Image (spheres, helix red, strand yellow):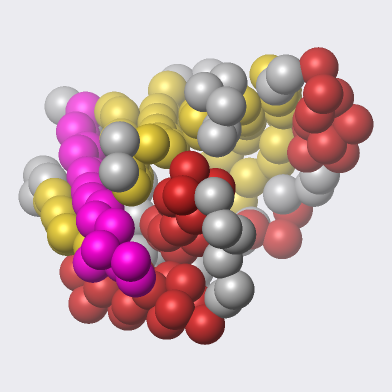
């Protein structure tokens, strides 16, 4: 079977970086659960020309360390850890707010807003570094976490994390989508991740 992931991130200037990867995966029984092994078959990065060197590094980056993945008896990812809960998200955002409070900020109001946005977006983006626990066998429970941010200087912001997944008729992953968006005083950044599992 083939597992694919497409991650799109908007940058501060409104341009976009897209990272696409495809793995060939195989499932085998292991104890009361299953073992998922995988080999990366494709990697492609679309990015602005100014980021060509970084894009090339990302394309060449190995993902071998993410395999194998162990699934529990109910099909949830056991060995790779759990995805972030609402409490985890709040903890990440609270840490971002503490970082903002500690950092010296530029005098220009627009620069301040963009620095706040970058800090909060990085905290939210870290949520996409772990696979959803029900990725391979979605349980059909979608989630949305939204939080208003109160930043120094009376600046306000908003954070939204959305997860939606759909199973195939056979019960395994058809598609899953996660979106993390942050906005600060009208400036916004967004990251969208889409997973699919198809017959090879």
Magenta stretch, overall SS? strand
Q: Position of residue 123 (x, y in %)?
A: 45, 63
Q: Who is closer to the viewer here, 65 or 155?
A: 155
Q: Is residue 167 magenta?
A: yes
The residue furthest right is 53
Q: Is residue 99 left or right of residue 60?
A: left
Count the marks: how many? 0
The answer to whether residue 110 shows anywhere in this view is yes
The answer to whether residue 35 shows anywhere in this view is no
**x 19%, y 33%: residue:** 166
Question: Residue 97's image quarter?
Answer: bottom left
From what the image shows, is residue 131 above or below residue 89?
A: above
**x 82%, y 23%: residue:** 50
Q: Who is closer to the viewer here, 70 or 181?
A: 181
Q: Is residue 23 magenta?
A: no
From what the image shows, is residue 194 above or below residue 96?
A: above
Q: Who is closer to the viewer here, 113 or 180?
A: 113
Region of the chain picked out in magenta, as a range = 150-168
The residue furthest left is 141
Q: Is residue 105 left or right of residue 180?
A: right
**x 33%, y 66%: residue:** 153
Q: Is residue 191 left or right of residue 9?
A: left
**x 42%, y 23%: residue:** 198
Q: Is residue 61 left or right of residue 171?
A: right
Q: Who is closer to the viewer here, 26 or 195?
A: 195
From what the image shows, is residue 126 above or below residue 161?
A: below
Q: Position of residue 179 (x, y in %)?
A: 32, 39
């Amino acid at each position: 079977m083939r597992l694919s992931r497409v991650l799109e991130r908007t940058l501060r200037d409104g341009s976009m970086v897209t990272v696409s990867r495809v793995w060939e995966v195989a499932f085998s029984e292991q104890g009361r659960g299953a073992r998922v092994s995988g080999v990366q078959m494709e990697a492609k990065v679309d990015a602005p020309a100014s980021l060509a060197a970084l894009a090339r590094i990302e394309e060449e980056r190995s993902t071998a360390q993410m395999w194998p993945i162990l699934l529990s008896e109910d099909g949830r990812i056991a060995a790779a850890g759990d995805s972030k809960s609402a409490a985890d998200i709040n903890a990440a955002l609270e840490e971002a707010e503490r970082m903002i409070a500690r950092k010296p900020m530029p005098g220009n109001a627009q620069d301040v807003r963009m620095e706040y946005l970058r800090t909060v977006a990085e905290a939210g983006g870290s949520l996409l570094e772990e696979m959803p626990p029900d990725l391979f066998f979605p349980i059909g429970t979608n989630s949305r976490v939204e939080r208003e941010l109160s930043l120094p200087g009376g600046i306000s912001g908003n954070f939204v994390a959305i997860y939606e997944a759909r199973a195939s008729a056979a019960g395994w992953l058809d598609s899953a989508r996660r979106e993390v968006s942050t906005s600060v005083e009208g400036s916004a950044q967004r990251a969208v991740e889409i997973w699919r599992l198809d017959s090879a």
